[in-house]
Amino acid sequence: MNRKVFIQPLFNIQMLKKFLNEMVVLIVGKQAENIADLLNTNKHVNEFIIAKKLNITINQTRNILYKLSDHGLVSSIRKKDKKKGWYTYFWKIEILKSLEFLREILINKINQINNQIKSREVKQFYVCERCNIEFTEENALLHDFKCNECGNIFTSKDNTKAVKEFKRNVDKLKTELEFVEDEIKKEKEKIGKIKIKEARKEEKEKIKKKKSAKKTMKKKSAKKISGKKIRAKKLTKSKTNKK
């Protein structure tokens, strides 16, 4: 029981890490795969630290980050160096947007494979067994069922094995999509809680300011009244002295 409790969150973290790395590779290439790990933090990370850890130049680092930023997958803040006068950027991955981006990719892949399955189930395919080149029935007919490369006659291909493989891939992608959907839900809940917390904090600050303003007004009012009383006393004293 306890083992499952600890294993499940660890599995989720590893899966999320895997998907984020795949997303980065898809957009900017294999050389930047580890950048997702560096950016997956609560605080924004100095771009010079990112460059150092990836062992690439700052310009290469910025190019990678700009490409990810174009898809809305990372956010940045800038801070001015008081001594040198230049700005340094700090970056962080946007988990929710990244997960939504991954969801779109998975949905597109599932749709593409499902289209291939439908095609395999209704169409006949032919293959040159010597060159291992596949043709649709229409293309095979155009070539008179003969391979242009080697002259070998095409043979009819059994799509059963291919369809089974495609269906296995769809099942795998659906499992991944289910995980991503679940993570999106969790991330939205987390963001919702943060917003509620911030709203409550803001409301408390407003109440605090109102109370402070009331106290200030009371003090000013009391000061005015006190001033009036002092002036009245002085005036009365002055009149008494004159008499």
Image (cartoon, helix red, strand yellow):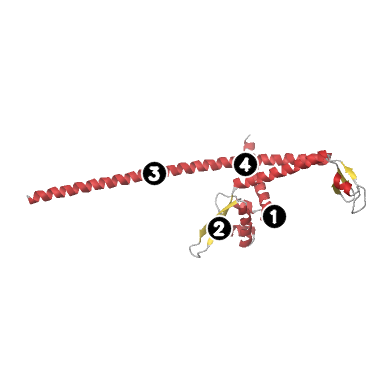
- Using residue 90 as the reference point, say whether residue 60 is left or right of it: right
Q: Are marks 3 and 4 in contact (CB under 8 Å)?
A: no
Q: Position of residue 213 (x, y in %)?
A: 34, 46
- N-term mark: 3 or 4: 4
**Residue lying farthest to the bottom in this orientation:** 84
Q: Position of residue 160 (x, y in %)?
A: 83, 39
Residue at the disc numbered 3 = 208
Alpha carbon separation for disc pair 3 and 4: 37 Å
**Residue lying farthest to the left in this orientation:** 243
Question: Regarding mark 3 in the picture, which secondary structure is present there?
Answer: helix
Q: Give the residue type that dot 3 points to.
A: Lys
Q: Residue at x 73, y 41 (%)?
A: 172
Alpha carbon separation for disc pair 3 and 1: 52 Å
Residue at the disc numbered 1 = 30
Residue at the disc numbered 2 = 89
Q: Give the residue type that dot 1 points to.
A: Lys
Quadrant of the rendered image containing residue 137: top right
- Using residue 225 as the reference point, say whether residue 51 is left or right of it: right
Graded by Cα atoms within 10 Å as few (under 14), some (14 to 19) or many (20 or more), the crowding at tag 4 reads some
Above or below: residue 76 compared with residue 163: below
Quadrant of the rendered image containing residue 28: bottom right
Residue at the disc numbered 4 = 183
Q: Residue at x 67, y 49 (%)?
A: 23
- N-term mark: 3 or 1: 1
Q: Are marks 3 and 2 in contact (CB under 8 Å)?
A: no
Q: Quadrant of the N terminus?
A: top right
- N-term mark: 2 or 4: 2
Alpha carbon separation for disc pair 2 and 4: 28 Å
Graded by Cα atoms within 10 Å as few (under 14), some (14 to 19) or many (20 or more), the crowding at tag 2 reads some
Q: Give the residue type that dot 2 points to.
A: Tyr
